[in-house]
Every structure is written in C-alpha cells, then in structure tokens.
Image (cartoon, coloured by chain):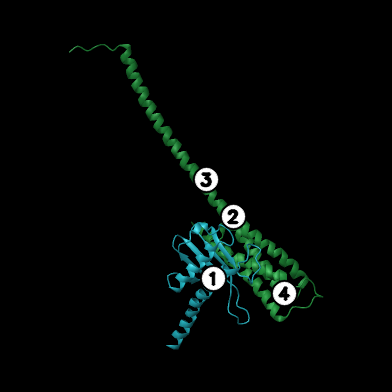
Amino acid sequence: MQVEPLISDHFMGILGLIVGVVGVIVGAIGTFVALRSDGKMKTAQQAQRRVEQKLLRHMATRTLETLTENALAIMAKIKRREWGDVAESAENLGQRVVEIRGAWSHVLEPLEKDKLDAAAMNIQQFIDSAPTAAPEPQPSEQDVQVMLVRCRRLAEISSEVAGRLSVELMQHTED
Amino acid sequence: MSTTIGALMAFPDDPRKTEFVRSLLAKTKEGKVSWNKKGNAFTAAIPNGIVVNFVVGASLFGTAPTWQLFTVRDRAGNELLQVNSPDFISIISNTATGPLLEATNHLFAAVSGISGDELEQAIESLKKL
C-alpha cells in the first residue's frame, strides 16, 4: 500500500479541524462563563429585590405604628376633653389614613384594605361630629364613647397590619 | 350565579350588582357559601377565586352590630363591588341606595345570623356540662 505524501491541502484540512475543535471548546467555555455570570446576576437582582421588599415592609410597618400612636393620642385627648387639639389632630389623622391606604396598598391584604377603608369612614364621621372648640356645647358621655370607638377601630386595624408585617419581616430575616 | 363577574364594575347602579348580592344571599341561606368571622369582619370565598367581605361596625350601647362595608374581589384582589352602609359617609366611594342596599342588608342579616348561632352553641355546650 502506497502512502500518499501530505500535501498543503491536507495540512490546511487538519489545521481547520484543530481550529474548529478549539473554537467549539472556547465557545463552550464562553457559554458556561456567560451562564454562570447570568446566574450570579439573577441572584444579585433577587437579593436586591428582597432587600427592597424588606425596606418597604419596614417603612409600612413604621408608618402604621405611627398611625396607631396618633389614633391612641387622639383618644387620650378626647378623654381629656381637649376639643381644639382633637379636631386638628383628627383632620391630620383622616388625611394620613387615606394616604396610607393609597401608598401601601400593595402590602395590604384585601380584608385589611376593607378594614382600613371602614376605619377611614369612621374617622371621617368622627371629624364631622367632633366639636372644634371649647365654647361649643360639650358632647354627652355617650357621644364621647362613640368618638372613642371610632378612633379605636383605626388603632386596632393599623396595629393589626403593622403586627403582621413585622412578623413577616422577622420570618424573612431568618430565611 | 349567572352574573358575569367582570361586568359588575360597569356602572354604579348596574342591576347585576344587586343580582349578585341576591344570588349570594340565596346560596348563603342554602348553606352553600361558608362565612368565617375574622375579627370585626365576615369573609367568604366562592368559586373562581372570588372573595367577599363584610366589615362590621362596633356594637354600641348594646345595639346589634351593623355592617359598614361590603366588598367583592376577584382572584387578583381587584375590587368588583363595594357597598357602603348609608350610616357611614364615605370619602372613598358612593353610598349604596335602593335594591342593592336592601339586598346587602338582607345578606348581612343572614350572615350575622349564622355567626350568632356559634355563641348560642357555646352556651348550649356549657349547659350540657
């Protein structure tokens, strides 16, 4: 059997094969590195989203806790019959409830939204019924009790939601 | 319930809203809709992920508690129907009137009646001790 000598075409073919194999290997390594970086990028983005979610929940919790404190402060003023302060504070409170209902809607459960809406209605009625200054006829004891109940409902729901959010925040921190 | 849920938000006095509430009342009376008490609210889940809620007002001076707000939401939490009690001035939406309000009042009476039985059952349980 006669072996044909290698001509330049053969060399070119072998060289092309080697280059092709090297190209495939480089391509595979490149793909692997890209996928790994993509995975790392996604993990980083997920971590960033988690941090943002935690921060939002923390802010919502703080806002709702403040709302509870404000509602309780107004209840204390009602008990002390400080009607001038009560009227002004109640106006601010009503505005805050509507703001919170809009701003933190995405962290509220549907039933919590309803309860906050109902609490907002209660506060609105309370604002309409509260005397604005001392010289006005003083509300009866029964009227005072109604005012207290209306404020208490808001304190209850804001406290309830703040509690749920803070527990969820702790659970996510443990995760 | 033949009402198309998506069409319930069409316009404020849509008669289908009343039809929905009346159908829910009928199913509640038949015992096909299970209502649960959650704090100062009654809530029920019906097929297709629809959730209905009653927020109950405080009971003052021994009076029977009344409802403040009735809502219907779809699976995604979008509000399909909201009815406010006329006793509560709403800054959020229109207060219901007419047949829709009447139907909602009847529904609440049925729902709170079912819940009232639980206390009665608790009293009966104590008597049997």
Q: Find the distance from the CA under tag 4 to the CA under tag 3.
A: 49 Å
Kind of residue indicated by mark 2? Leu
Which subunit holds the residue at mark 3?
A: A
Residue at the spot 45% in from the left edge and 88% down from the top edge? B127
Q: Quick one: A17 or A112, which is closer to the camera?
A: A112
- For label 4, the residue is A78
The x and y percentages for residue B126 are 46, 86
In the rendered structure, are the residues bearing label 4 and label 3 in contact, judged by CB atoms less than 8 Å apart?
no
Left or right of B75 on screen, residue B98:
right
* Mark nearer the N terminus (4 vs 3): 3
Which subunit holds the residue at mark 2?
A: A
Which subunit holds the residue at mark 1?
A: B
Question: In the structure shown, which secondary structural element does the residue marked by tag 2 occupy?
Answer: helix
Question: In the structure shown, which secondary structural element does the residue marked by tag 1 occupy?
Answer: helix
- For label 3, the residue is A45
- For label 1, the residue is B103
**Residue most extreme to the left:** A1
- Within 10 angstroms of label 2, few (less than 14), some, or many (20 or more) residues? some
Which callout, 2 or 4, points to the residue nearer the camera? 4
Kind of residue indicated by mark 1? Ala
Q: Find the distance from the CA under tag 1 to the CA under tag 4.
A: 37 Å
Task: Specify whether disc 4 shares its chain with disc 3.
Answer: yes
Q: Which mark, by number, is residue A56?
A: 2
In the rendered structure, are the residues bearing label 3 and label 1 in contact, judged by CB atoms less than 8 Å apart?
no
Which chain, by letter, is green? A
| Res B34 seen here | no
Kind of residue indicated by mark 3? Gln
Which callout, 3 or 1, points to the residue nearer the camera? 1
* Mark nearer the N terminus (2 vs 3): 3
Residue at the spot 48% in from the left edge and 42% down from the top edge? A40
